[in-house]
Amino acid sequence: MRKNEVREFLIEDIEFPAVGIAKHNDKKVYIKGAVPGQKVLARVSKIRREKIEAKLKEIVENISGAVQPKCPDFGVCGGCVHQFLSYEKQLELKEREVLKLFEDAKIDGFEYLGIVGSPEKEEYRNKMEYTFGDFVKGGELTLGMHAKNSGFSIVNTDNCTIVDEDFRTILKTVVQYFREKSLPIYKVIQHTGYLRNLVVRKAKNTGEILIALVTTSQVDFDLTELTENLKSISYLGQLKGILHVINDGLADMVQGDKIITLFGEDYITEKILDLKFKISLFSFFQTNSKGAEKLYSEVLDFLGDVSNKTVFDLYCGTGTIGQLASKKADKVIGIELIEEAVEAAKENTKLNNISNCTFIAGDVAKVIGEVKEKPDTIILDPPRPGVHPNAMKYVIKFNAPEIVYVSCNPKTLVNDLGVLRAYGYEVKKVKVVDMFPGTGHVETVVLLQRKII
Ligand SMILES: C[S@@+](CC[C@H](N)C(=O)[O-])C[C@H]1O[C@@H](n2cnc3c(N)ncnc32)[C@H](O)[C@@H]1O
């Protein structure tokens, strides 16, 4: 086998996140987006001692029961890899991927409570970060997602089916407007250009919409006309604000050096279960509001009776889980890295008339050592890399009787569960919750209890 060679592979297994596994001389070949039972053509991209990676080019033989993807850009856009599967099949594969990780990590003896699907299978996302670019170098301006297997091509995702009509209309309006203006696209390598990203947030339960155009400061362009165009659209929801974010940073990520409000407010408000949450542009908020209600209901269920108890909500974002838990608990202490999210969490407690929550801004690994209280229950909801080893030391030292771990990455979850088990915790219950139909991502909720010796 040689690098760049295109070969036929039979997919035998699947691993998180939606990576099909074929075999070549007993070595695993990892092919993203392929599923067991398919015969595919793939280009070999990496040959390592322990594994081979290949990029999917063509499906030679599909699995029985494959469905027609709804999105016209399926296969070109790098977004939703599993749209050709029925939703039942998607859930079956996600469950298999998560349980395989538990099995490989030798975590057993727990009650497995199954997988729960997203209430909405389409138009479920409440946030999109689009990138300005072109599909072919020097071609027409596009705005959307990175193309599959391509670092630089941008697919114009104006027909995307995981967002609703308001997102599609905003994208079309903005891209058409800038096609007529011939402003330079930001080039990541050269760090030159103007147009970088468009961020759209829409609170699915309240209908409130926030639009943010992200540019560099390299061009002085008057955005009044675009603002008026966006204001004149008749939305299904309600436009709350339009922002101009200046980002001169070198990193290829959506962030801001300065935020200018062009119209309205700089936040939207979402309703989750019976609480309200103010969401600013950069605060973390679960991207599927109806799915988040399912996820949080499972977390509350795993928390059980916490009356008279102190609950720590670590990696708390805008304080969603903590505030929902605070209605059952004596006291909640939340820690979150993003200061803006902590400010929103504090405001949210006022909005919800909650007085038993304290939110602290800082890195969990550093701040946790300064907290004087002791938790009876700890909620962990870390980002994809999992709980930092320094933070884990404190989690273990607190010796809380129960831990509820919410994870968007089952790979780092099982590693962290391994550490907690080594320090006297037992995995009692596991439930998988899907909030990302069409994609390979999934959430897992785990209840751990300290062993009684
Ligand atoms: C998966 S989100 C969970 C947020 C929240 N529980 C929710 O459901 O909305 C993880 C959060 O951890 C925060 N975070 C990342 N690294 C952190 C760190 N070192 N210390 C504290 N918070 C961190 C992120 O900003 C993000 O808000």
Image (cartoon, rainbow, N blue to C red):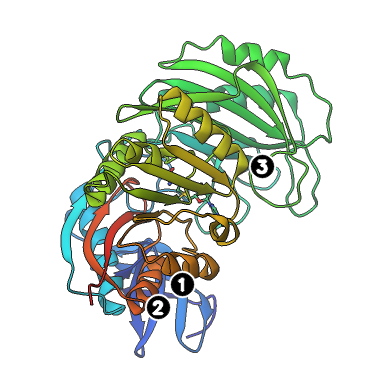
The answer to whether 325 appears left or right of 99 in the picture is: right
Say which amino acid is labelled 3: Gln
Check mark 1 vs ligand 1: CB closer than 8 Å? yes or no. no
Residue 391 percent across, percent down from the top left: 51, 64
Mark closer to the observer (2, 3) = 3
For the residues bearing labels 1 and 3, Cβ distance under 8 angstroms: no
Q: Which badge, 2 or 1, comes first in the chain's sequence?
A: 2
Q: Is residue 137 visible?
A: yes
Residue 446 percent across, percent down from the top left: 28, 60
Closer to the camera in the image, 204 or 172: 204
Q: Quadrant of residue 41?
A: bottom left
Q: Which residue is mark 2?
A: 29
Q: Which badge, 1 or 3, comes first in the chain's sequence?
A: 1
Say which amino acid is labelled 1: Ala
Q: Secondary structure at mark 2?
A: strand
Kindly report the distance in space between the C-alpha atoms of the residues bearing marks 1 and 3. 32 Å
For the residues bearing labels 2 and 1, Cβ distance under 8 angstroms: yes
Q: Which residue is mark 1?
A: 54
Q: Is residue 86 visible?
A: no
Closer to the camera in the image, 404 or 94: 404
For the residues bearing labels 2 and 3, Cβ distance under 8 angstroms: no
Q: Quadrant of the C terminus?
A: bottom left
Neighbours of disc 3 within 10 Å: few (<14), some (14-19), many (20+): some
Q: Which badge, 2 or 3, comes first in the chain's sequence?
A: 2
Q: Quadrant of residue 400?
A: bottom left
Q: Secondary structure at mark 1?
A: strand
Residue 6 percent across, percent down from the top left: 46, 73
Check mark 3 vs ligand 1: CB closer than 8 Å? yes or no. no
Q: Which mark is residue 11?
A: none
Q: Secondary structure at mark 3?
A: loop
Q: Residue at x 21, y 74 (%)?
A: 108
Closer to the camera in the image, 58 or 11: 11
